[in-house]
Image (tube, helix red, strand yellow):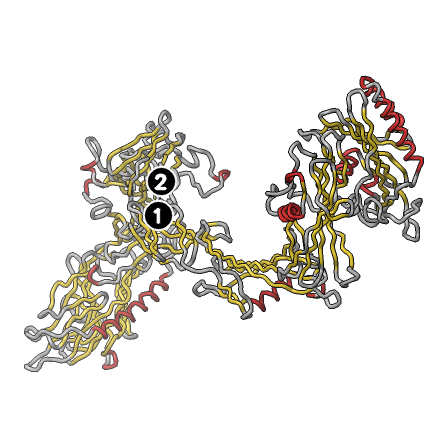
Amino acid sequence: MKHGKRREMGVRLTALGLAAALVVGGANALHRPVHAGQSAGSFVEEKNLNTIFAIRTTTAGVGLVDGNWVRLADEDHWVDGVSSTALFSKGKISLKANWKLEANFTIVGSGHCHYGEVALYGSTTNYRFSAGRVGGIERLTVVHGNDYEQPQQPLTEADFGEDKPYCLSFDAAANAFTLSYNGKSITYLNPFTEDVVAVQIRGLMDYKGDVPAVGRVEGTFLGMAYTDYSPTFLETKLLDESGQAIPAGTPIADGSIVTVQAKIKNNWENGGTVPSRLKLSDSKEYPTAGLHFDPAAWGDGKSQKITVNGVDVTAQGDNVATGGIPFDCSPAETVITYRAKVANPEGKTVTIGQMMVDDFFQSKQYSGDELIPAKPLVPYDPEKPAEEQGTAGKDYHYTRTPANENGWNAGPVEITFYPDQFNQFLIKEGEAVTATLDQGNRKTSYSQETGGTQTTYQAKHTETGELSTTVEDAVKIDATAPTLSASGKALTLSDSLSGIWKVERYDVKAGRWVGAKAFSLTDGNGAASQTFTASQNGKYRAVDAAGNASPALAVTVNDPPSADPSDPDVNPSDSEKATDENGLVHTSIRDSMQEVIDREAPLYGGRFTAEDAKDLFDGRYGFSSNVPESNDLTYAYTIAQGGKDVTGEGVDTTQPGAFTVTCVVTDAEGNTTTVVLTDTLIDRSAPPTVDWGEDPDPPVGPSFDPLKPLPKPTVKDDPATGKKHAHLYDSITEVVGTSPAYGGKLTTQVAAEILKGRYQFGSAQGDGVLTYGPVTVTVEGKEVPLGTAKPGSCVISQTVTDSQGNQTTVHLTYTFVDQGAPPVVEYDPSDPTVEPGSRPDAPEVVEDWQNGTKYATVKDRLVQVVSDPPLSGGWLDEGEIRDLIAGRYRFTSAQPDGALKEIRFAVTQNGKAVEGIDTTQPGEYVIAYTLEDSSGNRTSLFLQYRLAEKTAGGSIEGETAAPGGGQPNTGDVGTGLLGGGMGRETGSCGIHWGLLALAVLVAGYTLFRKGQLDREEGRDRETL
């Protein structure tokens, strides 16, 4: 006996590939109708011979089945001159339906008998449908037992070889078999009386004599199926335990016994009857879930019941979960019922997956149906708008404090149940119920930190037994912020519970935290520690997986932009560096320069603007970024003069003075370098400047108010030098003290100390060079000291000269008044209506001979030009008139306490009181102002205020002398506190001065009767 070698796999795979292609073509040719509700791909033909057949006999192990290919005989396997194999079917094929067995036979060799065949076996007889050399004769034949004289077709050598087509089919309507092979065929009437027969596939080789034959017999089966068979599930539905319909909307509780009803038919028109079985699906595409079929586990009194078309077949023993329920699939509808127990504690969808399997070919028709829909447990969705959430208890059943994207909460987790569709809510940890919520107890919470408490939520209705689906959750709470530390550029982030998620940096420009790096998470959890190398300045913070953030940590790793002078003559100050709360570094640099103005060819075209600032810095400095991999810099320029931002309008470069240009350079991180450049515009003809001294309470001399502006200097051309000479007039009024001031004598030495403490001189040339002339004290035109023990006045003078020969002289009038004098009235030299160096006329003083009270009258005159637009909008009200008086004059009490109080304020025109002054037209007014000191002494100031129009020649109408022509100051013609020309001439308008004299006489009369003073003052007011 020889053991043959297995055929090469490549040949077999080629055959299988061809077979698969032919089977597909055959299946398409059947055009099986698809019932409504049936999946088009749910019918599966069996292609594996091992499923349908089993090897019954084989010579020396020659028989081999691989899928749809079979080796039946070959030259390597012999026993007593025979090599053969027979496969018998596991079931019986129906003769009440059409079917077909298609194969490609390979019959090659020289044996005496050399063939392949399909044989059908009834209970008492068999018929073989053979092709090849049968009984030593090449023929296609039907053999009944040993009867070789049945119908036959001769074969030739051309009919032998590789892959010759063989087909045995049955037509139930004709009740006949058709055998075809390589283009030849035989029709044979059905000789069997049974409805089903067994099938054998066989191949054989033999030889006579001592020389073994050569060759082989093999077959590849391409199609094996009923051809008038389209099994269809018409309907599958759920009934109650007794097989009755379940009313719509009736809840089916878990544990209920139910009946599954399947309606089935062979949907092929005029199709045959095929013995089949109804089973549970073996495909994952058609699952069975939530049902139990073993009645032994159903409980007492519960049993299985199976019916086919109303006939109880339970006693047959098998059900859908075991061997299947047998039935005949025919064109007539078949109704099958069987019981099951609902086993669905999680409330999921209950489904049934079924299949019809024909008994012979084992083809399968699948069906999948939902018997009990799931009742989903729906949480409130925080991602949806509130108007889309629906109704609590119906559209959603519970709320849960939302976790972040990593599944963590940074605080307590609260769960709230909304009863309606369900009236109970169960929370489980494992199998244990940890909380039961209902109408009276709707909330529970988790507050302790936890790395993950696994929970399951399910709702139920305790009256109907209806269950919701289950929702699995993991409660993870981390309420502790992570930590962040730095060592140089290296940052260490730590968190022991949820772990580190990311490191963030505060973007100052955007005003928010941005991600610097995110670390990978595992199931929403981060590592307990991470490191990060900072490459940017800024505030950093660690964020754990729960979203907790560490306190911000400022980290500085980069310097601000560098500022390198492009000009070797530029020597800026040392930089001042500061780090802000965000870890950003800011450097400040101060620089200065001087430029001489040229009025004929003005600097910067006459105005320094922001564009000039850019050009100036571009040529003066080179800036560069110190941020790695970023050269981005932004520039901002501002211009300021006199404490005011003038970036918009720029600076007039035809006028002397200083202004600052600030350049702020910002890098990509927000670090800045600020250069403040002071540009001093120098006028070579500008005289030295004068400012208040540093200490408003100097060591020598009276105190002063540093906030009050100094008098404006008068600048003149010096005919002797051709240079500018400025004169500044200032005054001090002081009461003669009990102990004379300055030891009783104001000398040049004392005067020098007074000037030194009261004033500061500066050069407008930018070089700081000043030459101080001698200090002089002049009394009535003579340079002599002033005695301070009695009333008197002197002028203290000093001239300062700069490097260009320009000069400034200070003229300080220092007056001592008697302690018993009435209040003193002096001009305020700083007021623009006062001509430098001028003083009011001496007062007219009368004394009450009874009590010594003194009454002084001071007369003054001010001329104002009517302007367009008019002064003060056309009207000076009382407040503005008071401001005029307070600005033009200084009032000093000669009493030790220095107190003064107002007795009278009045404005009249043509002898009648008025509420204000109309500045839109010419007119004359008298302003009367009386002050009283603590001893009752009074001084009355009468200011004659005239509004006049200017003539075509530039003079003021009605004035006989030019304004300000050396007379006591009424202000320059073109300027003044009230804005317009002012002028004064002593002796003009005698009528008005006569009225003033009359007022003085009236005031003198009151000296005889002090008690009648108020009444007389009222009479004076009427007179004025």
- Using residue 672 as the reference point, say whether residue 715 is left or right of it: right
Q: Position of residue 514 (x, y in %)?
A: 44, 53
Separation of marks 2 and 1 at Cα, in angstroms: 38 Å
Q: Position of residue 54 (x, y in %)?
A: 16, 61
From the viewer's perspective, is residue 505 above or below residue 1002?
below
Amino acid type, mark 1: Asp
- Badge 2 crowding class, 10 Å Cα cut-off, few under 14, some 14 to 19, many 20 or more, is some
In the image, what residue occupies the spot 65% across and 41% down?
Answer: 705
Closer to us: 897 or 660: 897
User: Of marks 2 and 1, which one's residue comes earlier in the chain?
Assistant: 2
Closer to us: 456 or 637: 637
Q: Is residue 309 visible?
A: yes
Screen quadrant of the N terminus:
bottom left
In the image, what residue occupies the spot 64% across and 33% down?
Answer: 739
- Badge 1 crowding class, 10 Å Cα cut-off, few under 14, some 14 to 19, many 20 or more, is many
Kindly identify which numbered label has been placed on residue 249: none
Q: Are marks 2 and 1 in contact (CB under 8 Å)?
A: no
- Using residue 518 as the reference point, say whether residue 957 is left or right of it: right
Screen quadrant of the C terminus:
top right
- Using residue 597 as the reference point, say whether residue 588 is left or right of it: left
Amino acid type, mark 2: Ala
Identify residue for label 2. Answer: 374
From the viewer's perspective, is residue 666 above or below residue 901?
below
Please tell me whether mark 1 sits on a helix, a strand or a loop. Answer: strand
Q: Position of residue 39 (x, y in %)?
A: 37, 53
Q: Is residue 348 visible?
A: no
Image depth: mark 2 or mark 1 in front: 1
**The quarter of the displayed image where residue 620 is located:** bottom right
- Using residue 702 as the reference point, say whether residue 629 is left or right of it: left
From the viewer's perspective, is residue 838 above or below residue 909?
below
Identify residue for label 1. Answer: 544
Closer to us: 320 or 376: 376
